[in-house]
Image (cartoon, rainbow, N blue to C red):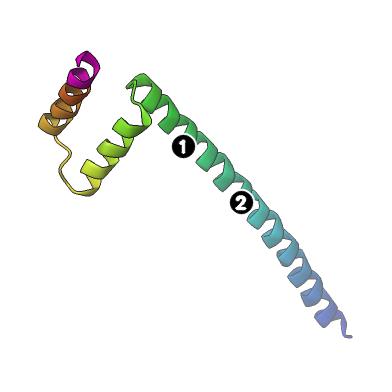
Amino acid sequence: MSAKLERIAAERDKARRKRDEWDARVKELERKYREEENSEIHDMVRAANLNPEQLAEIIRLAGAGNLNPENLQNMNGMEENGEHD
């Protein structure tokens, strides 16, 4: 192999190693991002004192485009009525 080909091959191999390092770094950062995102979601749910059923209802309403203060108030009223019966 000529010196020029060897130099190009060495640069290519170095670039591949760097690519692999960056791919691993991206994968690790994506994992950390998901972990932090999940932690923030968990903290928000806890701060709002929501149970799983309430959270599911909020997500359902939001998905249907019906999430508004009146619907949330009705949801709270239904819970209060259910607890007092």
Residue at screen point 54% across, 37% down: 35
Residue at screen point 23% across, 43% down: 62
For marks 1 and 2, the one nearer the N-term is 2
Please report the bounds of the magenta region as a residue range.
Answer: 80-85
Left or right: residue 5 versus residue 47 is right
Name the residue furthest top: 84
Q: Residues within 10 Å of mark 1 (few under 14, many from 20)?
A: few
Q: Is residue 81 in the magenta section?
A: yes
| Residue 26 x/y as whole percent | 60, 51
**What's the amino acid at mark 1?**
Glu
| Residue 40 x/y as whole percent | 44, 30
| Helix, strand or loop under label 2 | helix
What secondary structure characterizes most of the magenta part?
Answer: helix
Residue assigned mark 1: 37
| Residue 82 x/y as whole percent | 21, 21
Note whether 47 is above or below 4 in the view shown. Answer: above
Note whether 68 is above or below 5 in the view shown. Answer: above
Nearest to the observer: residue 66 or residue 19 = 66
Nearest to the observer: residue 7 or residue 68 = 68
Residue assigned mark 2: 27
Q: Is residue 74 in the magenta section?
A: no
